[in-house]
Image (cartoon, rainbow, N blue to C red):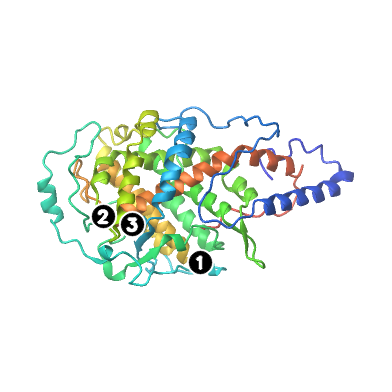
């Protein structure tokens, strides 16, 4: 193990080395089996106390989340009490359960040679009689051009608050931040997300590595410490935060024993992928607040939206839960503006910079067609579309990069946006509950030294 894993190991006494390794291995196996559960959501789990005396563990992350308007303590509090329980209910309802996606596309960058080890890579598509009947009907209301004319005055220049009467029905229009043609219904299929959970699939190796390498090296290079461009820094943090969330879900629902089909929590993997790197945790919180800001900014639009699936009882519950989430008094008082988007795109190079970053994000969206695992592609497309929808809401631009256009969302964008927020909420909750105790246990169980030439498993290659 790296980064100070030798601390507290007792000096590496060779005579005790064998006993120590057996004890550590035994303790790790017991820990893994103890937490092994097969679950598709993140239920509440009590926080562990390193000392076992009932005293809360000291917080590692405190103060304001970098580049955001809320602190870690507030985020954890409103997530546990308000957002997480509400989102868990919402995503199980028919409107948010079914996602329309183009699963089979040619990779525009290289031949698709990805291979999956597990049948869990495959996606169960919905038969035509399963998903809601209203989803099958094309929108035949006002054209996008006509809708723009109907909206009246543009939003205010400073905070770009959205028109409270903006919703006119679901539209069929592409998202300028993503590459998929969302209006091409002939190549789309509906997927029940509850039957296709985001979890470990065995998709690993060169194909998975090439996906992330292409995203980071070609489209989202890590900013140097002296970089002053807030916009490029924000793009990197959004992708890093999404990457961290994906890693959390892999670790949370992991195939511990393929021979017995035993699924559970892989806590050492969680530590190695995310917790060992504070920046990755910080970026997870940043992405969560960024997406939450988009949802709260579009509150009036989302409140008026039609959540029609043909089941009045479910649809009424959906509408009620959406309003409950958007206007919860604790959320509005404790964290009224999670992220301040007004500070971006300032200066004379703002429009050109926006075009550059929008092109980079579209490329990232297109890379999702190169993911060689069907289920990974599903969740990659959904979450990138959700992030693209958040960018669209916060910066309200059309394909020509004109500012202050009336907000128009399609049904699939809203489904992706709320499912992404739920994924991030689950990740934040799990990291908050398990983070400190896992780090203590991992450090105690880490070997004092790594022998020269010993191999280290590369745990950063899986996509899902």
Q: Nearer the viewer, mark 3 or mark 2?
A: 3
Badge number at residue 453: none
Tag 2–tag 1 contact (CB < 8 Å): no
Name the residue: 49% across, 46% down. Answer: 426
For residue 4, side relative to residue 97 (left or right): right
Tag 3–tag 1 contact (CB < 8 Å): no
Relative to residue 264, is residue 336 depicted above or below?
A: above
- How far apart, in angstroms, are the residues tagged by discs 2 and 1? 28 Å
Residue 27, percent across and down?
Answer: 75, 48
Residue sitting nearer the eye, 28 or 227:
28
Secondary structure at numbered mark 1: helix
Q: Earlier in the sequence, mark 2 or mark 1?
A: 1
Residue sitting nearer the eye, 90 or 377:
90
**Residue 359 seen in render:** no
For label 2, count other residues whose C-alpha is less than 10 Å away and answer few (under 14), some (14-19) or many (20+). some
Badge number at residue 121: 1
For label 3, count other residues whose C-alpha is less than 10 Å away and answer few (under 14), some (14-19) or many (20+). many
**Residue 412 seen in render:** yes
For residue 367, side relative to residue 309 (left or right): right
Residue for badge 2: 410
Secondary structure at numbered mark 3: helix
Q: Earlier in the sequence, mark 3 or mark 1?
A: 3
Residue for badge 3: 95
Relative to residue 154, is residue 307 depicted above or below?
A: below
Residue 9, percent across and down?
Answer: 78, 38
Residue 368, percent across and down?
Answer: 41, 60
């Amino acid at each position: 193990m790296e980064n100070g894993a030798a601390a507290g190991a007792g000096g590496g006494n060779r005579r005790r080395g064998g006993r120590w390794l057996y004890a550590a291995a035994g303790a790790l196996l017991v820990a893994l089996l103890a937490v092994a559960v097969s679950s598709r959501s993140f239920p509440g789990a009590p926080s562990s106390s390193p000392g076992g005396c009932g005293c809360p563990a000291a917080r590692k992350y405190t103060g304001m989340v970098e580049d955001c308007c809320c602190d870690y303590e507030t985020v954890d509090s409103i997530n546990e009490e308000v957002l997480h329980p509400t989102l868990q209910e919402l995503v199980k309802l028919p409107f948010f359960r079914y996602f329309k996606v183009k699963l089979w596309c040619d990779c525009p960058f290289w031949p698709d040679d990805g291979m999956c080890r597990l049948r869990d890579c495959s996606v169960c598509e919905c038969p035509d009689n399963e998903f809601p009947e209203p989803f099958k009907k094309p929108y035949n209301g006002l054209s996008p051009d006509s809708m723009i004319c109907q909206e009246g005055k543009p939003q205010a220049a400073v905070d770009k608050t959205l028109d409270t009467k903006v919703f006119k029905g679901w539209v069929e229009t592409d998202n300028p931040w993503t590459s998929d043609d969302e209006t091409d219904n002939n190549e789309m299929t509906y997927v029940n997300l509850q039957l296709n959970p985001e979890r470990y699939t065995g998709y690993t190796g060169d194909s998975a590595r090439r996906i992330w390498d292409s995203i980071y090296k070609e489209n989202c290079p890590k900013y140097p410490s002296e970089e002053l461009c807030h916009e490029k820094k924000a793009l990197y943090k959004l992708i890093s935060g999404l990457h961290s969330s994906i890693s959390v879900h892999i670790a949370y629902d992991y195939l511990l024993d393929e021979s017995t089909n035993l699924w559970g929590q892989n806590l050492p993997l969680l530590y190695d992928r995310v917790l060992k790197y504070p920046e990755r945790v910080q970026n997870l919180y940043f992405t969560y607040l960024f997406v939450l800001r988009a949802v709260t900014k579009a509150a009036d639009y989302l409140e008026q939206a039609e959540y029609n699936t043909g089941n009045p009882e479910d649809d009424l519950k959906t509408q009620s839960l959406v309003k409950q989430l958007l206007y919860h008094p604790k959320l509005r008082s404790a964290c009224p503006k999670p992220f301040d988007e007004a500070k971006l795109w300032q200066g004379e190079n703002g429009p050109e910079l926006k075009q550059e970053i929008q092109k980079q994000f579209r490329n990232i969206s297109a890379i999702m067609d190169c993911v060689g695992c069907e289920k990974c592609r599903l969740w990659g497309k959904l979450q990138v579309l959700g992030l693209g929808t958040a960018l669209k809401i916060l910066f309200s631009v059309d394909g020509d990069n004109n500012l202050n256009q009336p907000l128009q969302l399609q049904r699939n964008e809203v489904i992706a946006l709320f499912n992404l927020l739920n994924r991030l909420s689950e990740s934040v909750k799990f990291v908050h509950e398990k983070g400190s105790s896992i780090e203590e246990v991992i450090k105690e169980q880490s070997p004092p030294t790594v022998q020269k030439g010993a191999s280290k498993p590369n745990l950063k290659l899986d996509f899902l």
